[in-house]
Image (cartoon, helix red, strand yellow):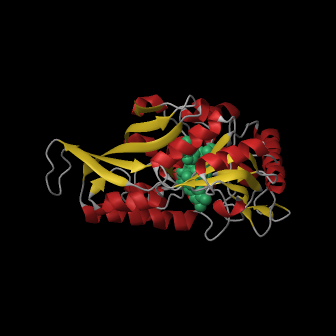
């Protein structure tokens, strides 16, 4: 491996760094070092570093905002590419753009490394409708495509408690969409780098977006750029929805904590009915809460006392502590409700 590292450094220069701790690049602040680390600032650099590393037989891992990952304590072998690409461009319009109206479509192209929040702010400021409810979603555009990240009531306090009353809905949601809205809904096209190092354009259907899922979780494609299709809207009304969404997050999710968001995926309605969960709830947080694990800690890792589907790092938690909590929750939920919980967070590297 040392030989390959030297070769990659010869090809790409000193920006390829050795033995870089990864915890600071994640919202969980957990994880060991990358053998090799490179920050790509443009799509050209991104493609070049991935291609050259693969040609040398060095495994490549992509890190966006690091807001949905659990990196192992021993770190990641091979090269980690931190995606810091950052361009946003309005590509064109179709139909008539009438002020205040919603006629026609506007196509906006964005590099996959752009912070999703920054992109949402851009679209809202431009009076473009389609992503405003996602204000407050951490991470990058590429990570949001990989996960098909969502706005959903299932991430809410009410859902954790299994109750979404009409009053709560009005209080929290106002004009927000119910029950869910996915980032993939607004995708028109994307440019990807395939595992064979081919750069190609694909349309929305390629991704087979579903709950917490896109096909690239299986194919290993890397998202380089995305074109979103949005519609003209009233800027003030869009800001209202965006700000309401942020307030709702503040009310329903633990704040100021080190965490990668929800640990487990919610279950399907069919699973909830089949296993007869209380009130047929689909909420993973509700199930973890009801097996008595809210607040349970292993080392500095703790199942959040605020939201049972969040695990928080209260100081110097290790990945191994988090895994113990995950297995404990999974085991108890299986035992009591007969439900197999699947992880939403992505594990990277060696434990
Ligand atoms: C406080 C908090 C709240 C959250 N709320 C929500 C929420 O409401 N809804 C929701 O869905 N999620 C939520 N999340 C989870 C997370 O923010 C999203 O899943 C986010 O979209 C992940 O993006 P990221 O750039 O941080 O991905 P990362 O964590 O960096 O990576 C996640 C996975 O995507 C892959 N990946 C990243 N970029 C690319 C790329 N360009 N091409 C190919 N693969 C790539 C990585 O290799 C990794 O496997 C929350 C997280 C936190 C910490």
- The answer to whether residue 345 shows anywhere in this view is no
In the image, taking residue 45 as reference, residue 1 lies left or right, namely right
At x 49%, y 30%, the residue is 198
Q: Could you say where residue 51 lies in the image, as x and y percent from the top left?
A: 57, 38
Q: Could you say where residue 40 lies in the image, as x and y percent from the top left?
A: 54, 53
Above or below: residue 76 compared with residue 303: above
Count of numbered tags: 0
In the image, taking residue 187 as reference, residue 319 lies left or right, namely right
- The answer to whether residue 306 shows anywhere in this view is yes
| Residue 263 vs residue 22, the one in the foreground | 22
| Residue 308 vs residue 123, the one in the foreground | 123
Q: Could you say where residue 236 lies in the image, as x and y percent from the top left?
A: 27, 66
Residue at far front of view: 10
Q: Could you say where residue 206 lies in the image, as x and y percent from the top left?
A: 45, 29
Above or below: residue 158 compared with residue 314: above
- Among the 4 quarters of the image, the one containing residue 337: top right
In the image, taking residue 328 as reference, residue 113 lies left or right, namely left
Above or below: residue 95 compared with residue 247: above
- Among the 4 quarters of the image, the one containing residue 59: top right
Image quarter hosting the N terminus: top right
Above or below: residue 331 compared with residue 286: above
């Amino acid at each position: 491996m040392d030989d390959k590292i030297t070769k990659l450094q010869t090809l790409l220069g000193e920006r390829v760094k050795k033995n870089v701790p990864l915890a600071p690049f994640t919202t969980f602040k957990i994880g060991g070092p990358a053998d090799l680390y490179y920050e790509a600032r443009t799509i050209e650099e991104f493609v070049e570093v991935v291609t050259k590393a693969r040609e040398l037989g060095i495994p490549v891992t992509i890190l966006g905002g690091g807001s949905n990952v659990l990196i192992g304590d021993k770190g990641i072998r091979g090269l980690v590419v931190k995606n810091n690409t950052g361009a946003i461009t309005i590509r064109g319009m179709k139909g008539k753009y009438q002020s205040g109206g919603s006629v026609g479509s506007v196509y906006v192209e964005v590099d996959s490394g752009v912070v999703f929040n920054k992109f949402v702010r851009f679209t809202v400021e431009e009076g473009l409708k389609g992503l405003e409810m996602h204000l407050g979603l951490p991470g990058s555009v590429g990570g949001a495509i990989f996960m098909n990240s969502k706005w959903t009531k299932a991430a809410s306090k009410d859902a954790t408690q299994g109750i979404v009353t009409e009053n709560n809905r009005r209080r929290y949601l106002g004009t927000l969409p119910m029950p869910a809205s996915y980032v993939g809904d607004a995708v028109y096209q994307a440019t990807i780098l395939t595992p064979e190092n081919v750069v190609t354009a694909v349309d929305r259907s390629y991704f087979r977006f579903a709950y917490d899922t896109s096909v690239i979780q299986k194919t290993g494609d890397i998202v380089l750029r995305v074109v979103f299709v949005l519609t003209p809207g009233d800027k003030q009304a869009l800001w209202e929805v965006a700000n309401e969404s942020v307030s709702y997050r503040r009310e329903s999710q633990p704040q100021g904590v080190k965490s990668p968001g929800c640990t487990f995926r919610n279950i399907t309605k069919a699973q909830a009915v089949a296993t007869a969960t209380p009130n047929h709830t689909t909420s993973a947080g509700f199930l973890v809460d009801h097996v008595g694990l809210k607040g349970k800690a292993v080392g500095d890792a703790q199942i959040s006392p605020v939201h049972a589907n969040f695990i928080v790092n209260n100081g110097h938690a290790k990945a191994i502590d988090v895994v113990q909590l995950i297995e404990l929750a999974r085991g108890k939920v299986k035992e009591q409700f007969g439900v197999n919980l699947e992880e939403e967070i992505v594990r990277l590297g060696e434990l």
